[in-house]
Amino acid sequence: MTAPLLPVPGEIPRTAGADIVHDPRPTGWERVRDAWSDDPARRRLLSWLAPTLVTLLAAVLRIVGLGHPHTLVFDETYYVKDAWSLWVQGYEGVWQNDANALFARGDTSALGTAGAFVVHPPLGKWLIALGIGAFGPGSSFGWRIATAVIGTLSVLVISLIARELTRSVTVATLAGLFLAVDGLGIVLSRIGLLDGILTFFVLLGFLFLLLDRRRAMPLLEDPTFHGTSERQPLWGRVLWRRPWVIAAGAAFGAACAVKWSGAYVLAAAGIFLVVADALARRRAGVAVWPADAVLRQGPVSFLLLVPVAALVYAASWTGWFATSGGYDRHASANALASWLRYHQDILAFHVGLTASHPYASPAWQWPMLLRPTAFWVGGQDAPCFGAERCIGTITSIPNPLIWYLGVAAAVYLIVRIARDLVRRRRVPWARVVPLVGIAATYLPWLAFPERTIFQFYTVLIAPFLILSLVLALRDIAGTASDLRHRRQSGQRTVLVIVVLILLVSAFYLPLWVGLPVPFWFWQLHNWMPSWI
């Protein structure tokens, strides 16, 4: 028998006849990570310091220069003025045709007392009204500060979601960083529209669902919780004590109180709870686990989730109920009957909205990013930076690299899940949650191909694409069981992608904040003719 070769000092030991062996030596990034993680105090500091720093970066990108332009941008003409009407009257009133110019000067005399027909619930406008009330109607900073703060908080929430999914500070930091520097997140935080507020409440609801999963799933997966002895139980126990489900219901109810599209996410959350509970009962050995989850735990989860959402939604209409001037307020002697009739009119409007618009974009176009919305264009033909012709714009083009890589990453997660199902492996929930979010925020819009909708609605989808992307990047970076050179190449690839994303965001930033740029520079950003 041939004696095994002695390892040369500094060389990786090899087993005789083996071509490839696991190399346990850490990469450079892993040495830095381990230096922090070895100390519990450092680990706790890092777990909050990194998300806090990216949240501060988001605040800078969203708040600096927030008052530019000092004019009502796109649908600010509705939401900002309605917010002021809510602030002073408790309901949305009718404005005269020349109200925009007067409002920008702080003159609100164009507001009438007659109730205006508005098609979105009041909560988002109440939040916008807080900033206007603090800084006055003539302050464009005040019009937008609420959406800027809420958009900044969305960055913190997505970091917490990513950390809850992966238990990784690095992945959480990347998720927050990508949302912080993405154009959709920046633009919808810098103008007084409702979609950024809607995004925050949806993300908050998903965070609460994940916190419930951390607390409830170990109980539901524990056979002893269901009273399992030597025999397989027919039914499991029903779990009522789920405070995070109640919190999620409140968050999703707030989303519905900003825009009705939040109801799709509320429905998806209910389905998610039932499916997660069913699979947990299956792992616990409950015999009729599907029926147990649907027929016994399902109604309980509904009672924990939906009524609180309905209460939050109804509470957002307090101003309409407490005053007498709101639209259709006296359509019936019964205020509740008038309110329901108003909702019928709103539903009819949404279903029948097919008016043409130059920036309309049906949902099938969204993954390809065919028609972003130009919210504001100004400064044409004015000299700047030595150029004879300049232009300033605010456009909803996201960071194209984040967007297209996010779409690819979502497809990747679908393939990985399908492969796990075919091989009868347990599917990691971390891969499921982003796809649930994408399905809830995107698929319903495909049912309305004729409705007038816009690309910027995807601000609600973008965080879930980002979560898909960071999960895919985690797989690219490799795990401790991979070969060292595999981990090194993967981590370098991730680093290159992150750097490229930051460079692309820096390149597009002037178009997201309305800075004047040479016309030729603006043209460089329009990668497709339909982006103009």
Image: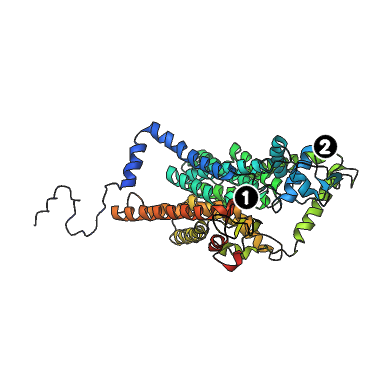
**Left or right of residue 197, residue 22 in this image:** left
Element under disc 1: helix
Disc nearest the viewer among 2 and 1: 1
Residue at 47%, 45% (x, y): give it.
172
Across and down, in percent, residue 311 comes to: 72, 40
**Most distant residue in the right direction:** 333
Can the viewer see residue 231 in this picture?
no
Residue tagged 2: 322
**Left or right of residue 369, residue 45 in this image:** left
Q: How many marks?
A: 2
Residue tagged 1: 188
Say which label, 2 or 1, has the lower sequence index.
1
Q: Dot 1, how many residues are within 10 Å of its Cα: few (below 14), some (14-19), or many (20+)?
A: many
Viewer-proximal residue among 443 and 519: 519
The residues bearing labels 2 and 1 have C-alpha atoms spaced at a distance of 31 Å
Residue at 45%, 40% (x, y): give it.
50
**Most distant residue in the bottom direction:** 529
Name the image quarter holding the C terminus.
bottom right
Residues tagged 2 and 1 counted as in contact (Cβ below 8 A): no
Q: Where is 387 relative to 79, above or below? A: below
Residue at 59%, 42% (x, y): give it.
63
Across and down, in percent, residue 499 comes to: 43, 52
Across and down, in percent, residue 78 comes to: 75, 50
Viewer-proximal residue among 95 and 200: 95
Q: Amino acid at mark 2?
A: Ala
